[in-house]
Every structure is written in structure tokens, then in C-alpha cells.
Image (tube, rainbow, N blue to C red):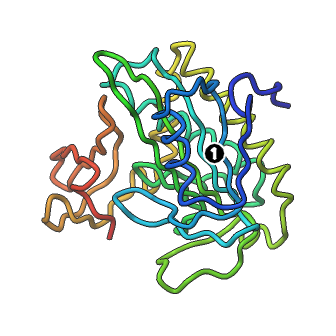
Amino acid sequence: MLPDTFVFSNNMIKLDATTSTNDYAQALLTKGENIAEGTVVIADKQLMGRGQRGNSWVSEPGLNLTFSIILYPKFLRPSDQFELSKAISLGIVSYLRTALPVNLSLISVKWPNDIYVGDKKVCGILIENLVSGAKLTHSVVGIGLNVNQTQFSDSLPNPTSMHLVANSAFDLEQVRKELFGYLDARYLTLRNGAWHKMNKEYAASLYRFGEMREYQVKGVLMRAQICGIDDIGRLILESESGEKVHCDFKEVVFS
């Protein structure tokens, strides 16, 4: 059993609707208000939810969890900011591996920060960091987890939900509490300086890790396998000839 959370959900701001929980959290920080670390902005409905690479996040009201967490990871250097993404992703993966009745290996991180069950997306993460000098001054961690939604727009390529995977509904409040416990544990590991302990686990949890597949890499089609992440969070692909290519967020497309 996880301990009570130490950082996450110290303060909860619950909204019926907002454009985006990340936008709301950023606005609080911009106003210079004294916001406690771990403050959560959670909304029943997001009017303009945002995902990675400018994508929108669509979620049916009342069925899923859409929230943002305000953190102050000043212990991380700007060059280490992807370590926060690793911690958050592994927290979600660890929770889902206890909550869903599937083979644990089916729950994975599609780099940089989508969570998959099999070949379908169950959760999206959007982390926005503010860097000042040699420190991260604050981070807003946005998470959208599909919990009880069973019907999705045809415009979404491969969505799923906890309900669809387990063939049963979940109590949203219970999911939130349990998920926060796992996220909190990972963040404390990070804050205690032991993020290196998560590196091997993160690599092993990557979607398609070690599988030879086709990718569009910097505009060129190639067969390669994912073999890890470098020190600044870039995906490392190894081609059939053994060449290793380090890819930034917009430089690789999964076929």
C-alpha cells in the first residue's frame, strides 16, 4: 500500500469547465500568487484541452480525469528536465499496471509522453516548464486519463480507456487518489536525487522497445529499433546496420 501523498493534492482547485487546466495553472503562476507545490487544477470539462505538438485533447465531461499539477522542481537543471517526464510517465504506468487486468508489458510509454495499452492511447501528458538561469522555476504537468469513456470521435486515431480495457467502470475519485499516490512516490524519488534508478525502468517501459519497426526519421523512412533515451530526453533508434540516431520530438514519426 502506498503512503499518504506528501506533495500532490495538497491543494485542489476544482472547476466545472475551463479552456485548459494547464492554461488556468499558468495564469495563477503569472499573477504571482503563492501557490503551494502539488496544487492540482482539475476540471470536469476542458473547452480547449491541449496535447503535445499543438494537438488538442478531447475528453467527454464527467467520464475522465483532466487535471494539471503545479510543481517547483528547482533541484533539476534545465538539461535534466526530461527526468520529470520520466517520473510522471512511470507513475502513471505503475498505477495502470495495478489497476488493469492485462499483461503488464502491454502498458507502455510511447515516447515522449503518451501512455499506451497495447497499440492504443489511454493517457496523454503535457509538461510545460519555465526555466530561469540554471534552474527550473516551475512546471505545470497536465494529464488527461481516459477512464470511463467508451465512445470516441472518429478523428482520434487510436483511443482507448480504462473502462474499455477492463470491461467495467471505475470510480473517478478512487482512480484519482490512487494515481496521485503513484505520481507522488515517483516525484519524491526524483526530488531525492535518485532519478538514475528510473532510467533502466523507463527504457524497458518504452512502447516498441527493442522491436524492429519502420519509422520516419528526419523525413527518411528507415527500419530501426528503439534502444533508449539519451541524457537530454531524445529517442535513440538503432538501424538494421547498427547506426544509432538521436531524435528530437519532431524528428521521428511512428509508422
Q: Residue at x 34, y 26 (%)?
A: 131
Q: Is residue 52 above or below residue 220?
A: above
Looking at the image, which is closer to me, 171 or 10? 10
Q: Nearer the viewer, residue 188 or 144?
A: 144
- Which quarter of the picture shows residue 51? bottom left
For the point 73% across and 48% down, the residue is 14
The answer to whether 198 appears left or right of 62 in the picture is: left
Crowding near the residue tagged with mark 1, few <14, some 14–19, many ≥20 C-alpha atoms within 10 Å? many
- Residue type at numbered disc 1: Ile
Left or right of 140? Residue 218 is left
Q: How many marks?
A: 1
x, y percentage for residue 248? 24, 47
Q: Residue 67, position in %: x, y? A: 63, 49
Q: Position of residue 130 (x, y in %)?
A: 38, 31
Q: Which residue is mark 1?
A: 92
User: The C terminus lies in which quarter of the figure?
Assistant: bottom left
- At which x and y percent is residue 202? 49, 38
Q: Quadrant of residue 177?
A: top right
Q: Residue furthest front?
A: 31
**Which of the 4 image quadrants contains residue 12?**
top right
In the figure, 35 relative to 102: above or below? Answer: above
Q: Secondary structure at mark 1?
A: helix
Q: Residue at x 70, y 49 (%)?
A: 97
User: 185 left or right of 121?
Assistant: right
The quadrant of the image that shows the N terminus is top right
Which residue is drawn at the image coordinates 42% and 41% (left, top)? 128
